[in-house]
């Protein structure tokens, strides 16, 4: 439930409402805003009888929120969240961030070359997977902790913050030692124990949409992280499973403006996993920025045809540099 106070409500009236909420055995979360003062009510399992609250001085209205998420919704938090990763900012009013790098960390030479190429082209964060969620057990599973070291090494050499996927709670210590953003992959979007654990950390999280997740489930997954206290969550649309087989997934681009309406969290797009085809990465990156994405994450490999994972959707350094040139023109047009 959301309690909206009158503009003229005094601090004492707000305190009294918060106390009344706590007396009902519920949590009261003040929601400061330039447009209104509101108090979020958390901890209720079902409908809250708000008759006593509505009568309190200073209360304008109460709004029942029946969605499985509250903290990540605009109703509860009208101002947009900006997530700051070592000075690289994601969110409204910030220049969209391009994240780039290989699907998987394969070797020191590959990572150093990838980092050099993406940095020279203008990417602001380096990606690379050390723990890989592969569909089959016979595929390359990633270099694990050795890979994390190579990612950090390459990021440091290029002067870029790094992002990598964490699949299990037991990997969190090692990943936190080496990464600036924790990536929760599509397959783990509803790994609720993992979500709760990363929620207890103070490290930015990139949460990818599950391949069959509805927007409500996506936001409810983000709610798990924010409910534990970690508000630095970036959402990522990476395509959903549909009947269409010509592309690896179907890029659901309308979630970008929709999530910007529904939630205050930043949202980026991954056109590589969304399409599975390198020729589609540039047009869909542009479409994502036009739709209002706060960033794009692109797979880039120094030699895509020899990549151990996802080569078909990876750009080489030259194609990525060309894309970045085009994106710069587009961003200027969009007013950045
Ligand atoms: C990835 O980004 O490396 C990845 C595995 O993506 P997803 O979880 O979206 O499939
Ligand atoms: Mn990949």
Image: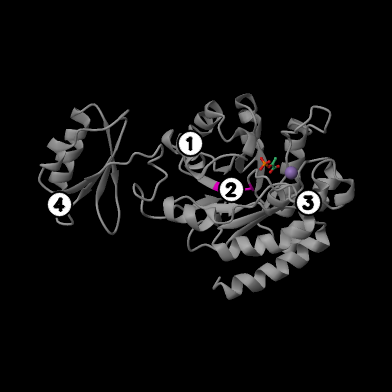
Q: Residue furthest front?
A: 243
Q: Nearer the viewer, mark 4 or mark 2?
A: 2
Identify the residue at image location x=75%, y=57%.
118
Percent x, y of residue 175: 65, 34
In the image, which residues are magenta? Answer: 235-239
Numbered disc total: 4
Q: Is residue 239 left or right of residue 110?
A: left
Disc 1 marks which residue? 225
- Mark 2 vs ligand 1: CB below 8 Å: yes
Where residue 214 appears, x then y in whole percent? 53, 42
The x, y position of residue 22, in whole percent, is 22, 31
- State the image quarter where residue 322 is shown: bottom right
Label located before the other in sequence (4 or 2): 4
Res. 9 mark: 4
Residue named by callout 3: 313
Residue at mark 2: 236
Question: Label 4, label 2: how many angstroms apart (C-alpha)?
Answer: 38 Å
Q: Where is 285 relative to 223, above or below?
A: below
Q: The C terminus appears in which quarter of the rendering?
A: bottom right
Q: Nearer the viewer, mark 1 or mark 2?
A: 2
Q: Between 189 and 117, which is closer to the camera in this rendering?
A: 189
Q: Earlier in the sequence, mark 4 or mark 3?
A: 4
Looking at the image, which residue is at 63% across and 63% down?
287
């Amino acid at each position: 439930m959301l309690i909206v106070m009158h503009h003229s409500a005094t601090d004492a009236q707000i305190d009294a409402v918060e106390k009344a909420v706590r007396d009902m055995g519920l949590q009261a979360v003040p929601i400061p805003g330039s447009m209104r003062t509101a108090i979020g009510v958390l901890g209720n399992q079902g409908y809250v009888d708000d008759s006593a609250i509505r009568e309190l001085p200073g209360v304008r209205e109460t709004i029942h929120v029946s969605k499985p998420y509250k903290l990540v919704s605009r109703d509860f938090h009208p101002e947009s969240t900006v997530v700051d990763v070592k000075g690289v900012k994601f969110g409204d009013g910030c220049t969209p961030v391009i994240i780039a790098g290989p699907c998987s960390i394969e070797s020191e030479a590959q990572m150093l070359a990838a980092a050099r190429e993406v940095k020279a082209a203008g990417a602001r964060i380096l990606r690379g997977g050390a723990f890989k969620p592969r569909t089959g057990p016979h595929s390359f599973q990633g270099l694990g902790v050795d890979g994390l070291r190579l990612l950090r090494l390459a990021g440091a050499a290029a002067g870029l913050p790094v992002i990598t996927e964490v699949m299990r709670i037991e990997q969190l210590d090692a990943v936190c030692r080496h990464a600036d953003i924790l990536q929760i992959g599509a397959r783990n979007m509803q790994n609720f124990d993992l979500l709760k654990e990363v929620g207890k950390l103070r490290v930015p999280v990139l949460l990818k949409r599950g391949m069959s997740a509805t927007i409500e489930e996506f936001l409810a997954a983000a709610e798990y992280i924010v409910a534990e206290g970690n508000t630095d969550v970036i959402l990522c649309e990476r395509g959903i499973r549909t009947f269409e087989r010509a592309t690896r997934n179907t890029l659901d681009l309308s979630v970008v403006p929709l999530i910007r309406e529904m939630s205050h969290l930043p949202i980026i797009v991954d056109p590589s996993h969304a399409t599975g085809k390198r020729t589609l990465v540039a047009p869909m990156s542009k479409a994502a920025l036009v739709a209002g994405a706060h960033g794009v994450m692109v797979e880039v490999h120094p030699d895509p045809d020899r990549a151990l994972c996802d080569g078909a959707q990876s750009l080489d350094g030259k194609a990525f540099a060309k894309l970045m040139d085009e994106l710069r023109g587009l961003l200027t047009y969009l007013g950045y």
